[in-house]
Amino acid sequence: MNAAQLLLLGIQIANAISAGIPAALRAKAAIEQMVAEGRNPTDAEWAEINAITAELRARLHGAGGADEGGEDADG
C-alpha cells in the first residue's frame, strides 16, 4: 500500500468510527442501566444491542477492516 492509500484508509476508518459513536454510546448507556438495575437485557434490548454491534462491525469492515487475504482482524 502506498502513502495515499494508507491516508485514504485512515480517513475511511475515522469516518466509520465517528459515524458509529452515537449508537455505541446509546448501547453503552443502556447496558450500564441494565447493570445498575441488576437485570439481563430483554429480547428487544438484545436485538437492539446486536443490531448496533452489527452496524459498527459492518462500518469498520467496510472501511478496510479486511486484509488482502479476505480475513478480518478476528481471524
Image: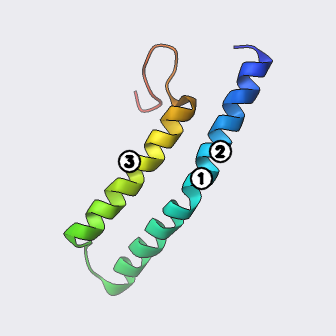
Q: Which mark is residue 68?
A: none
Q: Tell me if 27 is positioned left or right of 2 in this view.
A: left
Going 40% across and 80% down the picture, which residue do you hit? 33
**For residue 75, above or below residue 38:** above
Answer with mark 1 or mark 3, whichever residue precedes in sequence: 1
Residue type highlighted by circle 1: Ala
Q: Which residue is mark 2?
A: 15
C-alpha distance separating marks 3 and 2: 17 Å
The secondary element bearing badge 3 is classed as helix
Question: Could you say where residue 57 lies in the image, as x and y percent from the top left?
Answer: 45, 43
Question: Could you say where residue 12 lies in the image, as x and y percent from the top left?
Answer: 65, 36
Going 27% across and 61% down the picture, which residue do you hit? 47
Residue type highlighted by circle 3: Ala
**For residue 13, above or below residue 71:** below
**For residue 3, above or below residue 27:** above
Corner quadrant of residue 14: top right
Q: Which mark is residue 54?
A: 3
Q: Counting other residues with Cα less than 10 Å from the Cα at mark 1, is it few (<14), some (14-19), or many (20 or more)?
A: few
Residue type highlighted by circle 2: Asn
Question: Could you say where residue 11 lies in the image, as x and y percent from the top left?
Answer: 71, 37
Q: Counting other residues with Cα less than 10 Å from the Cα at mark 2, is it few (<14), some (14-19), or many (20 or more)?
A: some
Q: Which mark is residue 19?
A: 1
C-alpha distance separating marks 1 and 2: 6 Å
In this figure, what is the number of numbered marks?
3
Going 48% across and 69% down the picture, which residue do you hit? 26
Q: Are marks 1 and 2 in contact (CB under 8 Å)?
A: yes
Question: Could you say where residue 45 lies in the image, as x and y percent from the top left?
Answer: 29, 69
